[in-house]
Amino acid sequence: MRLVIGLVALGTLAFGLAQANRLPGTLGETVRGNLAADREATALFYTEVNGWEDWTARR
Amino acid sequence: MTDAPGASAQRSTLLTSEDWWAIWLGGLLIALTAAGVITGVAGVGRWTGDPTAAFAGQILPIAVLGIGFALITATAAQIMGGSFIVHQTGFIPLFLLAVVAYFVANQAGIRAAGVGYAFWALLLGLLISNTVGTPGWLKPAIRSELYIKTGLVLLGAEILFNRILTLGLPGLFVAWLVTPIVIFFMYRYGTRVLKIASPSLVIVIAAATSVCGVSAAIAVAAAARAKKDELTLAVGMTLIFTVIMMVLMPIGIRAIGMDPIVGAAWIGGTVDATGAVVAAGAMLGEEAEQVAAVVKMIQNILIGIVAFLVAVYWVTNVEKAEGSTQPAAMQIWIRFPKFILGFIGASLVFSFVLTPMMGEKAVTDILDLTSDFRSWFFCLAFVSIGLESNMKQLMGQVQGGRPIQLYLVGQTFNVLLTLAAAYLAFGGVLFDRV
């Protein structure tokens, strides 16, 4: 029973987070931006970002 | 089939310790990828409204990947003194839980909100272990240390020291000046002022706050032999605050009219996960996104150095063997977490051997694959940690809110110090304006 309750809670949390782009105004802006650009916002670690070399070259 | 008691002790630690096996497994995957034997790594796809899209054309590749992981980890388990069959029996469900974690994390909205597989893997493991309990047949496959350390050896390959030369002084100033100061401050504050009983908990939280969040927490936890509950607590706090900072920092920077480049450097030095840094930086503009990413990349390079120094400090100070008759150097070597050698070795080989030999493009292609392997191992590790964690013990780590207080005070210090450094380096004070 506790497992079922936990799974429902987990599902609810996942569903709520999936709606984060509907947060009003500036609060949801970053999430909407990530969605629009298909940006990898969850990456823990990576070393390649498009254009970074151009930026250092421009300096 | 298991060895007779004492038999494994007589064999070399090269074959019996998880530290060395992490190096063998990580090295094997790197070698196979670099040699062109492995040309792709299966993964759960992204999906929006149709969950089946996550597995379109991926079921067989994921199954092959799971079987491959089961075979190499079961071989390691067998040679370390466990059972090949028993490990495999438990590994398949463990791998399926990792697939579920990826599946949830890859939903477009959840992914955009910055809540990644590590969070879901931990939560799934915790849910099972604290409701129905972790089944006995699953336990032999729960080798958190092996998965973490193998993932870290693979992560080492991604830390390219040769990049430092091209990243520029302003970024180095922000990332490398502030980070050690924050770690030192948080360690002293946690152990001396808050009097948190476990120094390993303090250093894991300090590393997560000041370097690069979850990756640094994992590396330093392994270096300082932190408990699973301590890592769970540090990672949990980091994941939650990373999302909050990713959303709020660009809003705040724009609200006060700060120079976007200074703001981007500030974000790069303070927001923990690299993906969240890029997302927050992008809200300030394209150039700001690149500045934020560059500062974070420079900071990421510190992960190996910090893990190495923490391992040495732990062996020589915190866990110093009293009354030992062995020479100090031998003691240090025996107690030193060997996987760090694989971690640093992979970094040095990719930075100074493979990149000059094969070129940037070829190395980037290899790292695309090894980073996928690394993510799978971390996901398996987080499911395992969740399955091993007990909520009561986890609550015991909370210690009246002191770890959270440490995180908040440390992060506030980090935010203020990084702001000053970002202004000096990118605001035209110490270096020419970008």
Image (cartoon, rainbow, N blue to C red):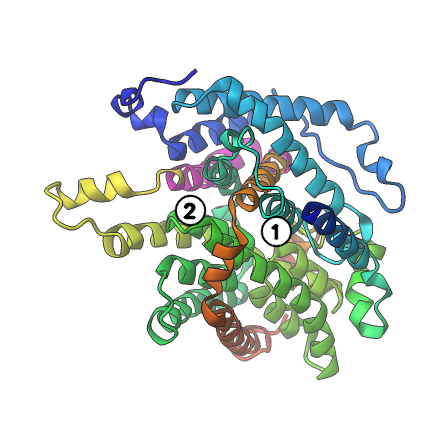
Snapshot quadrant of residue B251:
bottom right
Q: Chain of mark 1?
A: A
Circle 2 residue: B222
Most foreground residue, B202 or B40? B202
Q: Residue at x 53, y 67 (%)?
A: B170
Q: Element at badge 2? A: helix
Circle 1 residue: A44
Q: Position of residue B87 (x, y in %)?
A: 52, 24
Q: Which residues are magenta?
A: B340-369
Q: Is B349 situated left or right of A58 in this image?
A: left
Tell me if residue B428 can be seen: yes
Q: Is B422 situated left or right of B56 in this image?
A: left
Where is B307 relative to B284, above or below? Answer: above
Q: Nearer the viewer, mark 1 or mark 2?
A: 2
Q: Chain of mark 2?
A: B
Q: Position of residue B171 (x, y in %)?
A: 54, 64
Q: Residue at x 60, y 68 (%)?
A: B265
